[in-house]
Image (cartoon, helix red, strand yellow):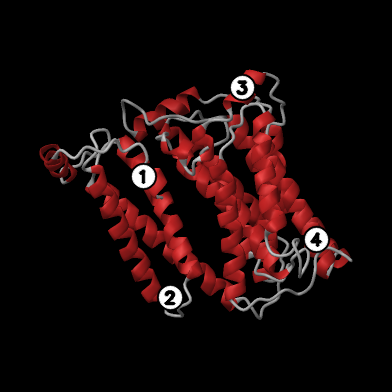
Amino acid sequence: MLLATLSQLDFSPNIADAAARLHRAFEPSLEWRDAVDGLRNITLFAGLGVVWITTSRSAHIRREIRVATLTSLLLSAAIEACQVFSPIRTASLIDVATDTLGGLAGAIATALLIIAVQDARQKRSYLGIPMLVFAGPYALAILCEALTPLFQTASPPDGGGPLQQFAARLQEAQVDWMLSDIFDVPLFVAAGFLLVALARERRRATAAQWAVVAGVGAIVVAAAHVVHGAIQLQVRLTAVMIDGASMALGAWLADRRLGALTQRWRGGARALATLVAYGALLLIWGWRPFLPETHFEMIATQFNTSAFIPLGLLAGRVDTFSALHAAQQFFLYLPLGALLAVWPLRTTGPWSALWPAAGLGFVIELGHIVVAGRTLDLTNALVACAGLATGWTVVRRCGYRPYGEAWPQ
């Protein structure tokens, strides 16, 4: 967090200039760019709230939420105080407010997740953990993808508010086919499948269950695709149709095949099949559009200082993608860590715990070097490890223990 907020500060000890900047901090502007920056602040400090609650040994969750919020407030105030002495940074009370809100939101969300996992401990489950902790984060990752699709980024608009931008993007909406649309299909199919599994785990299966999930999921995905026109992203009707239809297809497949799959795969075999399938999904997420980079000059540019500094590349961007992409990476790896908490590949040795999944995250990130259009960024691998560790720790602190080894002897 300090690397992201205090790097390239260009510190200046001039007291008079610092006093002027401090006065300006109490009279902040409210523009669309500030809203995007606020979203980035909330995402960054939400990570602090998540880590605080996840690693707390106290059983007094409400007190820990208050402490996490206060810590976010004090840390943010300290960061803004340092930025007062920078001629190229802007200190603002809005940043303090959004940072504190982010810490509070992350702490509350983690506390609610822990409570839900604890309550479901004695209930039936498909994977030995609540499907909520598996399907929920994946659904949030899908929502991030619909709000800020891959290869569609935009800076905050220079003129016109979000409503004007939204109207303009709707007028420009068109049907156009892209190669990346093909690889979106399995990602959204998996979301529909997992959401039906979640619904059936929590309630008795009904004939209309999959149709409800398909309809609601398609509507939410379509709305997210359309809404992102407000942040100056192109509204692609093709993506709306493909992603919505893929979500419905996944729900239909779950209705048809979920029962048979659970009968065929049991115990460690089911866990291993899930781990392999989810690992394949992560490869698709990470290596889309599977086109090799053939220019050596482009490969060489991947090896730069910013790529190996945590949040180095994202800190220089002011767009919604930089915030939602980090959150998406966290959501994608949290289910994997949660499943490995109860079904590790090995119960002892180097293949136990999270090492295989962490290695997968680093391999996927290194693969960006030779995939056209992708960028090497160590931050992605670190956020993946954070998601893994959070999922694993939440499940373990709720009393779950390994049922056995997923990898057969």
- In primary-sequence order, the first of circles 3 and 2 is 2
Residue position marked by numbered label 3 in the rendering = 298
How far from the left and from the top, in percent, is residue 227? Answer: 46, 38
Which residue does the image show at 58% across and 30% down from the upper left?
A: 303
- Tag 3 secondary structure: helix
Determine contact: label 1, label 4, CB under 8 Å. Answer: no
Q: Earlier in the sequence, mark 4 or mark 2?
A: 2
Disc on res. 272: 4
Q: Which quarter of the image is occupied by the C terminus?
A: bottom right
Nearer the observer, 114 or 315: 315
> Which image quadrant is residue 316 in?
top left
- Provide the residue designation for mark 1: 5
Say how many tags the image has: 4
Contact, mark 1 vs mark 3 (Cβ under 8 Å):
no
The numbered mark, 2 or 1, whose residue comes first in the sequence reads 1
Q: Is residue 318 visible?
A: yes
C-alpha gap between disc 1 and disc 3: 29 Å
Task: Point out residue 35 in the picture as x, y percentages from the top left corner.
Answer: 33, 41
Q: Nearer the viewer, residue 12 or 145?
A: 12
Where in the figure is residue 86, as x and y percent of width and height? 24, 38
Residue matched to label 2: 61
Q: CA distance from mark 4 to mark 2?
A: 34 Å
Instruction: Report the amino acid beneath label 3.
Output: Met
Q: Amino acid at mark 4?
A: Leu
